[in-house]
Image (cartoon, rainbow, N blue to C red):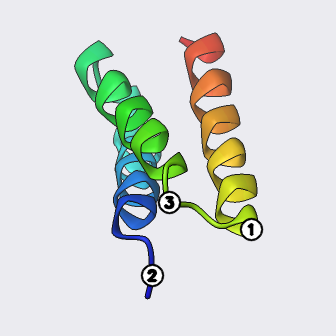
Amino acid sequence: MQNQMFQQAKNAVSRMMNRENGGFNEKDKQAAQNAIQSAYTNATAEEQQELQALEEQLKQENELK
């Protein structure tokens, strides 16, 4: 069974990264971060590695803004 929170976290970050011209706000970033944190609860070791990569993407995006 796939971790639904993990999929939601991936989708949230993906939506943010695909918006043109950085068209997301602090609320969007916080929602993505919250989804990632929630997903850690039931994540496998492999999913945790992917979640860490998603967090890194968010950090990099924040530094570019």
**What residue is shown with label 3?**
42
Depth check: give the residue in front, 12 or 3.
Answer: 3
**What residue is shown with label 1?**
46
Which residue: 74% across, 68% down?
46
Mark 3 lies on a secondary structure that is: loop
Mark 1 lies on a secondary structure that is: helix
Q: Outermost residue toward the front?
A: 42
Is the C-beta separation of discs 1 and 3 under 8 Å?
A: no
Q: Which percent across, then down, holds residue 35? A: 37, 42
Q: Nearer the viewer, mark 2 or mark 3?
A: 3
**Residue type at mark 2?**
Gln
What separation in Å lies between label 2 and label 3 (alpha carbons)?
Answer: 10 Å
**Residue type at mark 1?**
Glu
Say left or right for 24 vs 56.
left
Neighbourhood count class around disc 2 (C-alpha, 10 Å): few under 14, some 14–19, many 20 upward: few
Q: Outermost residue toward the bottom?
A: 1
Q: Which image quadrant: the N terminus?
A: bottom left
Say left or right for 33 vs 47.
left
Q: Which percent across, then down, holds residue 54? A: 61, 45
Sequence-earlier tag: 2 or 1: 2
Q: Nearer the viewer, mark 1 or mark 3?
A: 3
Mark 2 lies on a secondary structure that is: loop
Say left or right for 62 vs 8.
right
Q: Which percent across, then down, holds residue 12? A: 35, 49
Q: Decide: is 15 above or below 23.
A: below
Q: Which percent across, then down, holds residue 34? A: 36, 32
The image's mark for residue 2 is: 2
Which residue: 54% across, 48% down?
40
Which residue: 41% across, 66% down?
7
**Residue type at mark 3?**
Asn
